[in-house]
Image (cartoon, rainbow, N blue to C red):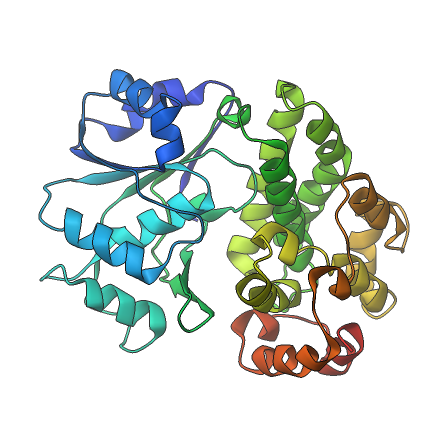
Amino acid sequence: MPTKIVFGNYTFNNINNYINGRKTLLITSIGFVERGLVDKTKSLTGSIIAVISEVKSHPEFQDLKIMYNKIKEMDFEVILAIGGGSVLDAAKFLSVYNSKKEYQFVEDITKGNIYKNNYNLTPIVSVPTTSGTGSEITPWASIWDLDEKKKYSLHLSDLFSEVAIYDPTLTLSVPKEITIQTGLDTLSHALESIWNKNASNITLGFAIKAAKLILEYLVLVSNNLDNLKYRYNIMKSSMYAGLAFSNTQTAIAHAISYYITVNKGVDHGIACSFTLPMLIDNIIGKYGFIDDALFKIFGELSSQKLRNIFQELNIPIEFEDYSVCKNEFEEIKLSLQYNERAANSIISPELLKWVIK
C-alpha cells in the first residue's frame, strides 16, 4: 500500500510537513468550519488556496457535480481532506480528472460506463475525524445515486491517499451515536475481511487485532466519550481494519447493507453490522481458518459475546427491527447476485438464503 501512515495524538499539528508547500484545496464539511477546525488548519499551514465545505453525509452525484465544476478551474496541487468517510470519499472523487477536467468523465468511470484509463489524480492528504470508514487507506470511494437507489464504488488501483494522518484527539468531539456507528463499521470491516475469498494471513492478522480492540473499547468509549485512551484504541482499530479490508474488500454483510441504507434510511455503520451475529452463527464450523480467527477474537465459537455488545449499545439485530418485510427478501437476494461485495464472500448462496429468509 503506497499510503504513508502517521498515527498519534496531536499529529495533526504537523500537517504542514505533509503539505510541503504545495497549493492546497481543503475539502471538509460545514461542521468543521463551525467548530473552528478550518481556521486552525489555516493557522498550521499557509498553503490553503480554497475551501470546499459542502460535503454531506453519503456523497451523491448531483452534489459532487456542483463541487467538481466549482473547483475545476482552481490551481491546486494537493487536496487536504479533513472529516469522516463522506468527506474522504468526496475528496477521492474530486481528485480524478482528465485532460478537459470534465465531471461526466469521472461519473462515467464510477458507474463503469467507460474504461478506467486516461485519467489523472491529484494527491490527497487524508485526515479522518471519525474511526470507522477506512477510506483514508483504501483505493475506492462510495458514491450514491439516490434517484437509482444505488451505491456505486469508484475503484481505481492508484486511488490511495498520499498520506493518512490519524490523530485520535480529533475524534473527541464525535457524538455518541456516530462513535457507535463508525465503531460498528470498523467491526464489520474486520469480520468481513475474514470470511472473504481474498483473505490472507496478513489481512487476518490485522482483522483480528481490529476486532479485539473494538470488542474491548467500543462500549467503554460510548459511555466515556472524553476518554482519550479509549478514543486512541478505537482509532487504532479502525486503522487495522482498514489495512485488512483495503486488501480484501468487504463481503456479504456490506452487500446486504446497501439495500437497507437506500430503502430504509438506516445509517451505513448499523446497516452493515446488525447481520454480523447471524453470519457468525452460520459460518462457524465450516472453515478451519475462519474458526481459528473467530476464536482468537471471541475466545469461543459463538456469536453470544457480539450479541451482548449490540445489546449494551442498544442496537437491534433483527431484520424486522429495520422494517424489512418478508416480501422484500427476494429483492435483497436479487441485488446480491450481481454485487461485487457479495461475490467476495466465502459464505455460500445456500447459506445466504437461510440468513435472510
Which quadrant holds residue 27?
top left
* Residue 2 shows in the view: no
Which residue is painted at 46% across and 40% down in the image?
Answer: 84
- Residue 106 lies, in percent from the top left, at 25, 64
- Identify whether 61 is placed above or below 173: below
Q: Quadrant of the C terminus?
A: bottom right
Q: Position of residue 1 (x, y in %)?
A: 44, 49
- Nearer to the camera, 169 or 196: 169
Q: Is residue 218 left or right of residue 198?
A: right
Whether residue 145 is visible here, answered yes or no, is yes
Q: Residue at x 57, y 79 (%)?
A: 335
Residue 183 picture quarter: top right
Between 336 and 242, the one nearer to me in the picture = 336
Q: 151 above or below 132? A: below
**In front of the other: 201 or 141:** 141
Name the side, left or right, on which 196 lies relative to 49: right
Give the camera-side residue of 42 and 198.
42
Q: Which quadrant of the view contains residue 5?
A: top left
User: Which residue appears at 24% of the width and 58% of the height?
Assistant: 65
Q: Is residue 67 above or below residue 337?
A: above
Count of numbered circles on the image: 0
**Can you say whether 119 is above or below 328 in the image?**
above
Q: Position of residue 177 (x, y in %)?
A: 62, 38
- 70 relative position to 39: left or right: left
Residue 196 coordinates in the image, percent (x, y): 65, 65
